[in-house]
Structure formats: C-alpha cells, structure tokens
Amino acid sequence: MEKSCDANTILPGPSASPGRFGRTAYYIREMFPPAVCVPAGLANFAAVYFSIQALDLTGPMTITLRSLAGALTTLLFLLLLRVYDDLKDADSDLRYATAGDPRYAYRSIVAGRVQLSDVSALRSSLTALLVGINLPLGFPLPLLVFASAMVLFWLSYHWFFWPAIQRNLLLAFATHNAPLSLALSTYAAAVAMRDFGITRHFGILSLVMVGLWLPISSWEVSRKIRHRDEETEYVTYTKLLGYRAVLLPVAFVSVSTLCLIYVGRIIGLSWILPAVLVTAGGVLVSACIRFLLFPSAGNAKLQTYAELFLLAAWAGLPLSILFHYGVRFR
C-alpha cells in the first residue's frame, strides 16, 4: 500500500518541517488537533471512570495514578485509530483527491507533506507506548480488557480490506464505530473497577456507555452528509439513504440525551447537565431538519453541530460529576 500511494505533488499546500519528527508533528496537528482531541479523549475516559465512582461510592471523586495512565491510554487509542484510518484509506484518499474532491486534496499524506512511512512509524511507536503503559496497571483488570481492545483495534484495521465491508458504508459503521467506542468505555470501566471494586450498577453503566457512543456515531454520520451538488466518488450516507440520512444523527442525539439525563438523575446531578445536553442536541437536530426541508450545500455542513453535541456529552457528564462531588488525588 505504501508504494501505491506515491503521488506526492497533487496539491502542495504549506510544507511540513524537514525530518521525520517534524513531519509527524505536522501530521498530528492536522489530523488529530491537540486542542480539540486531547480534552475530548480525556473526557471520554473520565465520564465512565467518574460515573462508576458516583454510582458506587460516596465522597469526592478520586483520581489515581492508574486512572491517569488509563486516560492517557484512551487518548493514545484515539490517535492510533486516526493513524489506522489514514493508513488503510491512503489509496482511496489519493483517488478521491485526484477526482477533485476538495475534502481530500489538501491532506498532508496526499500532498506529500507527510510520508506513509512516517505514519507507519507513528503506529509502531503508539503500539509500543500503549503496551508499556498498561503492563503495570494490573491483571486481570484492566490488562485483559486492554489486550482485548488492542486486538479489536488491530482487527478493525484489517477488516476494512474484506471487500464486503470496503464497499458497504453501513456495514463498515456497524463493524467499526460501535465496537471500538464501546471498547474504550469498557476499558475505562475496567480501570475504575481495578481501583474501586466491581460495580453493582451494570445497567446504569451500560446507559453511560451508550450515551457516550451515540455522539461519536452522530459525528461520523454528519460528516458524510452532502448536498447532491457536492457528491463525488466518495461514498456518503446521502448517497445511500438520500437526504433522510440526517434522521440518523437526530435519532442518535435524542437517545444519547435521554440516556445521559437519566444517568445524571440517578447520580443526583443538577439541572445544568440536562440543559446543556438539550441545548446542544437541539442545535444539531434543528440543523438536520433544516437540511432535510431546505437542502443546500451550506445547510449540509452538519459536522460542527455534531462536534458541539459531542463536546457537551463527553465533557458535560464528568464535569458535572466533579462540580457536584469535588475531587481528590490518591
């Protein structure tokens, strides 16, 4: 694959720094912007970790060294997933860019500012770092769950090349989005249960996991919705389902909001969390309905609204718990 994607002059754009380290840093800034992705990754872990404490314990939320390692692991998993996606999609990204798709023409790998060998080296470094962080964290929890997640992420990279999945966007969604998101939440739960014991509230915990998975599902669908005038060779949800594809983010955000509001009520949180979720979700739902009723290229830009709700869900729950219970370090 690395030899086949060698058109490095398609649209030059700004140059990366010379040397592998500089090119890798450029790649991370472009494809995994730290200002957004670092808080999101840490919040994703914290939402599950704090929820288990709030459900099973009394007193302030406790942050341990193991939990810091777990939060870093979640962040690195998300970066690894970005790396896997770019490696497996390198040929198709080049094809879309060559066909004139503006969303791909300026990507650093396509334009040659970053080489596939740089991204492959980053993949190896991330894998080694993840293993090194998690080996000391305890057996069977969370080490077994971590190992299972690693296998699942590796399989997601190779599953894509099964032709049935490669050709079917909905099948790719079912085999990648849900399992990987739930694997991260299960890992965070395993770290919490290593620190504080097995939870007695698996039912409520499952609602937390679903409530955190659906926002990323909403984002995944929203960024692949286009007006017919913008459609290219790239397979989008609007190509498969028509403009009614926007009903998927509407359903996802609605169910996620209900799940997290119910969890907040069980934990005893204030009205602020429901207000934030309903407001952010309402913005996305309104944007989706607007595009459905008045389809245009401008109204098709739903990704920003989906990111707003993702931030509200992933960060809103742990921050609400911290404000309600306080925090201490152990």
Image (tube, rainbow, N blue to C red):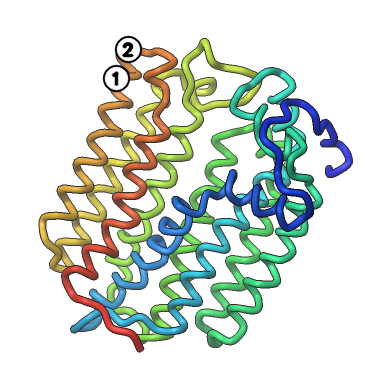
Q: Which residue in the protein does label 2 denote?
A: 294
Three-letter amino acid code at disc 1? Arg
Q: Quadrant of residue 252?
A: top left
* Cα gap from disc 2 to disc 1, whole angstroms: 6 Å
Residue holding disc 1: 290
Q: Residues within 10 Å of mark 1 (few under 14, many from 20)?
A: some
Q: Which image quadrant: the C terminus? A: bottom left
- The 10 Å Cα crowd at callout 2, few under 14, some 14 to 19, many 20 or more, is few
SS class, disc 1: helix
Tell me residue 175's x, y (percent).
Answer: 57, 48
For image coordinates 60% across by 78% down, the residue present is: 133
Q: Quadrant of residue 92?
A: top right
Give the residue displayed 28% in from the left and 83% down from the top.
Answer: 328
Determine whether, in the image, residue 111 is placed left or right of residue 179.
right
Up-down: is 263 above or below 189? above
Pinpoint residue 232: horizontal percent, then vertical percent: 62, 18
What is the x, y in percent for residue 201? Answer: 28, 73
Please tell me how many numbered marks the rendered image carries: 2
Check the image and report above or below for 110 versus 131. Answer: above
Single out the residue that lies furthest toward the left: 271
Q: Secondary structure at mark 2?
A: loop
Compare residues 77 and 255 and report the one nearer the observer.
Answer: 77
Left-right relation of 223 to 117: left
| Mark 2: amino acid | Phe
Image coordinates of residue 29 in percent, x first then y, are: 58, 49
Residue 7 lies, with reference to residue 174, above or below; the image says: above
The residue located at (61%, 23%) in the rendering is 102
Tell whether 123 sits left or right of 216: right
Labels 2 & 1 near each other (Cβ < 8 A):
yes
